[in-house]
Amino acid sequence: MAVQLSNNVFSISVGDYGDISSLRLVGDTFNTNYVMNSSNAPKQNTVDHQWLGELMFTYRLGNGAWTRAWTSSSADARTITSSGSSVQVSYQNSSNNQGIRNFTLNETYSLVNDYLHWQMKVTNTSNQTLEIGDWGLPLTFNEYWSGGNNEQIYETRVLSHSFVGHNSSFITAGRPSGIGPYLLLVPDSSTGAGLEYQDHWRVEEHPGSTWAMEQGGWSEGLNVFYIHSNVIKSTNRGYLSNTSLSLAPGESKTYAFKFYKVADEQAVKDRLYSEGHVDVTVVPGMIFPTNLKAKFDLHTSKSITSVTAQYPSETTISYLETAPTNHKIYELTLGRLGHNNITVNYGNGEKTVLQFYAIEPVDAALQRHSTFMVNSTQWNMPGDLRDKVFDDWMMQYKAKRNSFAGYWGWGDDWGLTHGQFLAEKNVQKPVASEIKAVDDYLEVAVWTNLMEGHHTDYLVPDFLMPQPNTTPTYRGYAYPHIYNTFFSMYKLAKLYPNLISYRNSKNTYLLRAYRIFKALYEGPVAYNWNTGLMGELTTPDIIKALQEEGLTTEANDLIAKMATKYNNFKNTTYPYGSEYNYDNTGEEAVYTLAKMNSNTTMMSKINAKTRAARGHMPVWYYYADPVTITGENWWNFQYTTSLAGYAMDDWTRRYSSKPEVDQRLSYAAKLANIGAINSGQISSDPANIGAVSWTYQAGKGNYGALGLDGGPLFNGWRGMSGEADLGLFGAIKVLSSDIAVDPIFGLYGYGCDVTESGNNYTITPKDGVFQRLHLITQKLSLELNRDQYSSAIVSKSRNNVRFTLKNTTAGTAHTTILTLTGLAAGTYDVLVDGTKTGSVTAINSSAATVRLSIGTAASYDIRIQTGSGNPTPAGDVVARYDFNETSGSTAADLSGNGQQANVNGGSWGVGRNGNALLLNGTAAYASLPGGLVSSVNDFTIATWVRVNTHNGWARLFDFGAGTDRYMFLTPKAEGTGMRFAITVSGNGEEQQLNAPELATGVWKHVAVTLSDNTGIMYVDGIEATRNTNMTLKPSSLGLTDRNYIGKSQFDDPYLNGAVDELIIYNRALTAQEIRSLASVSSTVADHKKVASSYAEGAD
């Protein structure tokens, strides 16, 4: 009969085995049981059960043999009693030779104030010295993932994260969605308790047991945490020193732990401090390169006795300061690659151990691996099936894997990802021999061999094998690897057209990427419409590339497909769909869908979920590393560590309310997968230097690597390269130099060195990519589409940027695109080596694009500085199209914001002033850039238009993302007059401005303004109508990818007429300003006159 205990925090049941069979939090968000029991994990209800609260000892008397003593084998010795708010479980004199005998054990569960106290006392009842070699706590939290729908998985199951670090050890267990509160277990510091070892049950050591991993439906298997571990250490899973406990006859020892209910990570840190432990905070993470300095904070009320390194001659530890309250801050540099323990002695004989991992400088590691791939992993056997394949490298054999017989051979998520990384790496840092290797790989290995017979349907067999290829084409996960590699190859051919002799044109690569993408959703393929696939963060870039190349039909096709996919996810409570009921694979893809649709609620869910999956503990193999269904003891550094880190990075920089705090885990995820590159710390064999490891196995052990092809472990790492390159692909998509003013550490440079002088930061990047710079606190970002920067000076006021551009293709003149997001509003001069080459206008912290003309020199001094003339008034022109072109398919944006329009089927002819865009009413229109008005609230859109003949519902302009979210202006709505409408819920919920239809055959000036809730429509400078109840703004539409002049979101007729001087403002012009636009011969000078009158306060 279970015994119940409850108060206003906990509700627990103590079962017949003296175990905690139910542990629930009062007032919890869901009715979650945080522990496994025979009901929620019935296959674990076996004779060798190890529920939470049961204990495992190994002891000996004197110098005798070691004997096992488990409470699960001691039913005859167990007594359970209760009194008040406590339950006592006692063991003595078991008749079982592997039960509790020769000592007594008394466990007590007590509800004390706001915590559950778990005390265990051992007394030596023998007449000899009792040595307890192992004192183990099986902690079976409710991590049984088999079966169940999303609601059951994300509301009834929990993920545990552990820090085995002696006296300051702690463990958390919380729902995988990140929805709190959750559970915290800490040692009772008054008893000297702590953890020094974690064992993980494998079937080789526990044959026939459903408690071993992957047995009985429990993927993870049992984890046992040890206070003492001098015998169990033989399983070789430890990182710390091992101890035993000796008790004289009659002597006792008591240890205790406390369970707390906590709201979030900060609450965990606060509780560690209040309990007398060391709360550790670290930047940039537990893995960092030898050319960077880390900082760590030992937050404790107790004195620090010493901080010592495992390799003192190769480590520098410097005490910096003690900041309020009791934040003891140190600086750390590591010179020895691989695992590094830092031991902290504190208080009265207490200690904890931080476990860091040193890697070589990131750029060196990435290049080392890239060179290794070309030299060692690519097959060069013309005419052979394997020719040009980038194969898996097997460190155990120091050779390529060479498996091409079919299923589980070369392909799928491991084989197809190698070229994906190498292609994208070369987009950032081109090496001709590597680009040629990728080009050969795509043409021979992929297009000719893998996709043989699929050059029209673009299906991708999952594995490469001799024809006929009998492996399936249904596995959707394989497709993004291939289309992303083709897309990177398109970028290479576009950016570096003369670096090699390419096998195909750039548009051939782009169209292959598109058609494989298309086949993924239209072909007989699974894992597509309702599944987030790894690598989908590129979707917006692929769409943009198609638009820029004039492939509008193809771009719109992908937009429509992604709209459908988004709709499949947007109303899902837990939008994390994958092939497993709990997984991390879909996070990056679904976040991208949400971002494309400005759904911050959905984005927030993904951010919370990916953070919940990752460890926050100061050990390198858990910190920022997502836990899968296999638990925290293996499959460490899955590709999602960095790839899904994209979601954390984007959320931290753009949306977080505490970006400096969130930055810590976010940046650690950027670096984490780089640790899988072997620079000698994984295998010192020269043949393996430069290879990568698929995964780390934190549980190490004596039985080698888990997973495909197994083999021995290399310092805990798997010998096969596998999916590691997908993680590296993710890393290079987000690696950056980030500056944050941390609430503990103050100014800190992630991936860089930074100093502060007055209002400026001086930055030396060391992030390995050298193309991105983010000011986390000030929310300013810079990104180059090619080349690199080697140093930068940036003002904290966000109004001055200077950097040295390193030309990665010196000797070849080209254009480099610089994107700045977050510049203070104004107009800036662009200077290259001191010469003004142009200007750029920043509006509302939105992205501003600068095209830099780079010559043949090795480096250039680039400056973005406040313009020499009067800055544009804050809130001015978003885009301006005068349509004075005479030929071509683009219309220039005269605002200086780089928002050029693509013309499809239109022509140029005489306009109201100069030339105009002529639209024939059949298939002619102009496409405007995606997101053009997504950050605009108040606005004006003004233009001259001559309607030749009315086609009902034809659009003058239409900005939207489909038929649910749009705003448009039509000269004549069917059966009525001119109409402006805006909606986020389809045509049944439009907010409108209605006026008489426009006259045909003459030039008319039309303007629409919105200020707060008041919308006004003007014709020829005269107000035609207004609506004072307009609550929607362009920003309400989110990211709009279908922005047109002359075309509708719907299948409406095209505009038959001409358009001239269309201007978009991000403010509502006054009536006088509208009259001025409508009355003057509107040249650029006249526009400046309007802006001047605004600046002077005209109304």
Image (cartoon, helix red, strand yellow):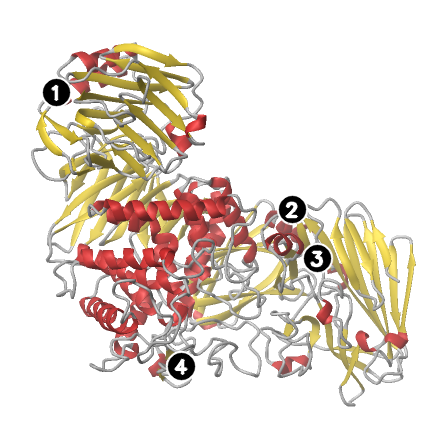
Q: Residue furthest bottom?
A: 64
Which of label 1 and label 2 is nearer to you?
1
SS of the residue at dot 3?
A: loop
Q: Is residue 412 left or right of residue 1055?
A: right
Assign the C terminus to one quadrant of the image: top left
Whether tag 3 and tag 4 are in contact, CB under 8 A, the answer is no
The one of 75 and 45 positioned closer to us in this rendering: 45
Kind of residue at badge 1: Arg
Labelled disc at residue 263: 2
Q: Which mark is first along the chain, 4 or 3?
A: 3
The one of 483 and 857 positioned closer to us in this rendering: 483
SS of the residue at dot 4?
A: loop
The residue depicted at 15 percent of the width and 64 percent of the height is 502
The residue depicted at 46 percent of the width and 81 percent of the height is 709
SS of the residue at dot 2?
A: loop
Can you see residue 913? yes
Which of label 3 and label 1 is nearer to you?
1
Q: Which mark is first along the chain, 4 or 2?
A: 2
Assign the N terminus to one quadrant of the image: bottom right
Distance (Cα) linking label 1 and label 2: 64 Å
The one of 574 and 319 positioned closer to us in this rendering: 574
Residue beneath disc 1: 912
Kind of residue at badge 4: Met
Which of label 3 and label 2 is nearer to you?
3
Residue beneath disc 4: 395
